[in-house]
Image: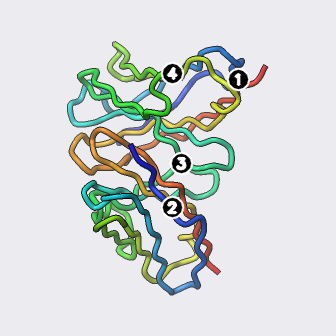
Amino acid sequence: QVQLQESGPGLVKPSQTLSLTCTVSGGSVSSPDYYWSWVRQPPGKGLEWIGHIYYSGRTYYNPSLQSRVTIFLDTSNIQFSLNVTSVTAADTAVYYCARRFYDFGHGLDVWGQGTTVTVSS
Amino acid sequence: SYGLIQPPSLSVSPGQTASITCSADNLGENYVCWYQQKTGQSPVLVIYQDAKRPSGIPERFSGSNSGSTATLTISGTQAMDEADYYCQACDSGTGVFGTGTKVTVL
């Protein structure tokens, strides 16, 4: 049974870089069967897809965030990470990592519990 | 990239049918997935590839997608179905979510 767990600082200062890591238990990010995704949810608002990465390193990003976001795989094969640069208060959100089967039309079937990130000085 | 539009809220009586729509130009040409999110919890996938249910999702959840509208239908709605529901364009190159619908069972 695959489980995902987000980790990282809960507080980030404006203009700095937000960095989060997702640890995969019971699986590997080097599997060709899955995309590994990041999703966020600002307080009281809806879900926002950030992007996802395939085992090959190919990435797909939300166009609205693409200029500030990087998703990458860790050489440990059990972690993948998210960087968001030049953060503002609008980046305050619960950040989720999730897994999606690679084939067309499959949804995010395994999610982490989410980690809250606040952007404030 | 496009926006997926959902009604903000929907009220349904227990035992009745709830139909949640998700709209975008030519949405029927893309696969749609649906998620349920209860307060304080991570989302749960309830429909993928327009109409398929993951293991463990009750049969009362069904989906369709044609033209410009995808629909999630909850038949015989139960109190436990009260939640926020989100559609998602779930083809490989994108993952954009809909605006979300709050379903109230009363």
Q: Which residue matches tag 4?
A: A68
Q: Nearer the viewer, mark 4 or mark 2?
A: 4
Numbered circle sitting on residue A11: 1
Task: Kindly identify which chain the residue marked by label 3 belongs to.
Answer: B
Task: Kindly identify which chain the residue marked by label 2 belongs to.
Answer: B
Q: Nearer the viewer, mark 2 or mark 3?
A: 2
Q: Is residue A46 left or right of residue B1?
A: right
Q: Residues within 10 Å of mark 4 (few under 14, many from 20)?
A: few
Q: Residue at horizontal 24%, vertical 57%? A: B29
> Residue type at mark 4?
Arg
Q: Residue at horizontal 36%, vertical 23%? A: A78
Taking depth in this image into account, of A38 and A61 the one nearest to the observer is A61
Numbered circle sitting on residue B42: 3
Gap in angstroms between the C-alphas marked 2 and 3: 12 Å
Same subunit: marks 3 and 4? no
Task: Kindly identify which chain the residue marked by label 1 belongs to.
Answer: A
Q: Is residue A82 above or below residue A101?
A: above
Same subunit: marks 4 and 2? no
The tag earlier along the polypeptide, 2 or 3, is: 3
Gap in angstroms between the C-alphas marked 2 and 1: 29 Å
> Residue type at mark 2?
Tyr
> Residue type at mark 1?
Leu
